[in-house]
Amino acid sequence: MKSITIEHTSTSYNHAQQSSMGMDRQIKKEKIPAKVILLSGIILLIGLSIVIYYIVGNSFFQQTLQIDRNRLKLAKVKNDIFEDFIPVRASVAPLKTVFLDAVQGGRVEEILVEDGATVKKHQALLKLSNSDLQLSVMSTESRVMEQLNVMRDQELRLEQNRLNHKNALVELDYSIRRLTREIRRKKELLINTHLSRSDYDDMVDELRYNQEKRNITTESQASDEKLMTEQLKFLKEKNNSMEQNLAYARKSLQDLTVRAPVTGSLSGFDMQIGQNVSRGLRIGQVSIPNEFKLVTNIDEYYLDRIVLDQRAYFDRAGQKYQLRIAKIYPDIRNGQFQVDLKPIGDTPADLRRGQNIQLKLILGNANKALLVPNGQFFQDTGGNWIFVISEDGSEAYKRKIRLGQRNNRFIEVLAGLEPNEEVIVSSYSTYKEMDRIKLN
């Protein structure tokens, strides 16, 4: 190796002295080991391979896969009638349900029917006992009867007073008529001096007294009659009110026997002998027989497309039955909302409460469209692309598409596919990252 001489010069005395005393040194250039060069080359080659793998590997390796044709579900794109509906599963429920509540509380003494039985209107279902209520009713009845007796006594006294006034007027009228006749006769005797003046004046005074007394008695009778009429009216109203209270008290005892409000099927009636039932407690319900509705839950995605009177139908025993949406519940629970459907026309005779029925809920009118069968591919691709089979059937490749409405059988194709093209409609979960698929 060539030597390199380095000279140190300085105007300083010390540096000059050191330079004269020392001697020249040689610096040798170190050689890089062959192992380091080999290792660096290997690392560079690996890095370059990784870059090439990620840049072009997808085009030549990962995006092409060979699959057995029999493992795939293939279908052809075709023009056909598209029915805009969604399949829903509905349960049969009674159209009308009357709730059964305990009007009076008490202890269960006797159960007359079993849960699930068919009952008739006013049929006795349950007997309760309530000693406090019975004592209260007896006390109320006693007070009412006492007040009714008091009112009847008052009515009797008023009637007797009216009769006394009437009797007094009869006596006074009789006296007035008698005195009037006497005075007329005595007046002639007075003129002929056969009667003293004082006796005559006494008779005239007595007549005047009776006349004035009659006037006072008439006024008193009119006043008493008016007061009696008002009192009798008040007493009759109070009497009616008391009798109604008595009837209500007696009905409270009758309410201890729970009866069916309507004819129908009894359900939710779970009573035990000796059980204490509080007032107002719901003890069951009665459903009207042979009148049903269907209740279903629909995904909230369709909330804006569901309206009242929208039609649905189902097939049973080869016959088609139609229904209409009668009520929409706006509450969203677990991503679904509830809908009630009522039958249009007849319903199957064998429908039972709680039975499940598969319905087709119509969302729009049927029209002709380009259709692809509904399959698992839609969940994997979101309907944005699909694998299309080549003309020779040897491979399938990705193609962007645009889809529209869908039902459980078909999806409307808006763009990206042509009639009679064959596509893969099965799941893409294992090869959705591929661009091409070789078919064996």
Image: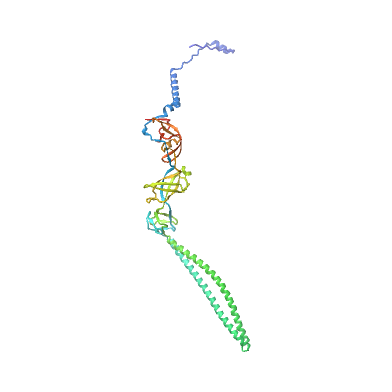
The relative height of residue 233 versus residue 187 in the rendered view (above or below) is above
Residue 214, horizontal then vertical, whole percent: 58, 77
Q: Which quadrant of the structure image shows residue 416?
A: top left
The relative height of residue 222 versus residue 138 in the rendered view (above or below) is below
The relative height of residue 195 versus residue 341 in the rendered view (above or below) is below
Q: Considering depth in this image, is 331 or 113 the residue closer to the camera?
A: 331
Q: Which quadrant of the structure image shows residue 20?
A: top right
Question: Tell me, what colour scheme is on the image?
Answer: rainbow
Q: Considering depth in this image, is 396 or 223 the residue closer to the camera?
A: 396
Residue 111, horizontal then vertical, whole percent: 38, 57
Residue 99, horizontal then vertical, whole percent: 43, 54
- Which residue is pictured at 61% across the width and 82% down the height? 205
Quadrant including the C terminus: top left
Q: Considering depth in this image, is 304 or 77 the residue closer to the camera?
A: 77
Residue 321, horizontal then vertical, whole percent: 40, 48
Q: Considering depth in this image, is 207 or 92 the residue closer to the camera?
A: 92
Q: In this view, does 18 lie to the left or right of 417?
A: right
- Which residue is pictured at 43% across the width and 32% down the height? 398
